[in-house]
Image (cartoon, rainbow, N blue to C red):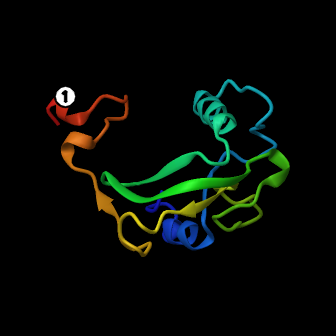
Amino acid sequence: MEDQYPGLWHSWFTEQVVAVGWPPPRWSLQTPSKDSAWDLARRRLLRIKPGDRIVVQLKNWRIGRLGTVLNLKIEDDQWNPTVPRQKGDVGEMGRRLEVCWDLTTGPLGPQFAIQLPPEARLATNGERDVERGV
């Protein structure tokens, strides 16, 4: 979402967090929804535990960093946007996962990213792009 929110990855890197949107009260972590995108994200958020490893996916098949989840602040009453509030809204990307970035693998700074080779890329439906000839 760097196009929509310039500097987002840099702020996540320095704050040692990753985050997703879907602000409460419209989207509740405790209540299933008819919004299929939120329902999928919600189910996946509920499966994450401290100690899990995450990968930050950036646009153009780039990887920003590997990290280990330390703490989850994803509950409705823990909303804390990583994209500042504007014009009375609630902000964006406020369901946070606190992480410890692995600084032994890959470039050290947030401005660097690793581009995945074609054979490692997944299409949006989960199949490898090279298998589809892309």
Front residue of this view, candidates 58 and 105 = 105
Residue found at x 64% / y 49%: 21
Where on the picture, by quarter, is residue 71?
Answer: bottom right
Q: Quadrant of the C terminus?
A: top left
Seen from this angle, which residue lies furthest right? 77
Q: Amino acid at mark 1?
A: Arg
Please state if 86 lies on the left or on the right of 115 as rendered.
right
Query: Is 57 left or right of 15, judged from the image as shown?
Result: left
Q: In this rendering, would 6 be left or right of 70? A: left
The residue lying at 46 percent from left, 68 percent from top is: 103
Number of marks in picture: 1
| Vertical order, 112 against 23 (above or below) | below
Q: Residue at x 75, y 58 (%)?
A: 90
Tell me, yes or no, if residue 49 can be seen here. yes
Neighbor class of circle 1 (other Cα within 10 Å; few <14, some 14-19, many 20+) is few
Residue drawn at x 76%, y 37% as measured from the top left: 29
Residue furthest to the left: 133
Helix, strand or loop at disc 1?
A: helix
Q: Residue 1, how many percent across, how many down? A: 48, 56
Q: Position of residue 23 (x, y in %)?
A: 73, 48
Image position of 16 (left or right of 61): right
Q: Position of residue 34 (x, y in %)?
A: 68, 24
Residue where numbered disc 1 is placed: 132
Question: Is residue 96 in sight in this rendering?
Answer: no
* Residue 37 quadrant: top right
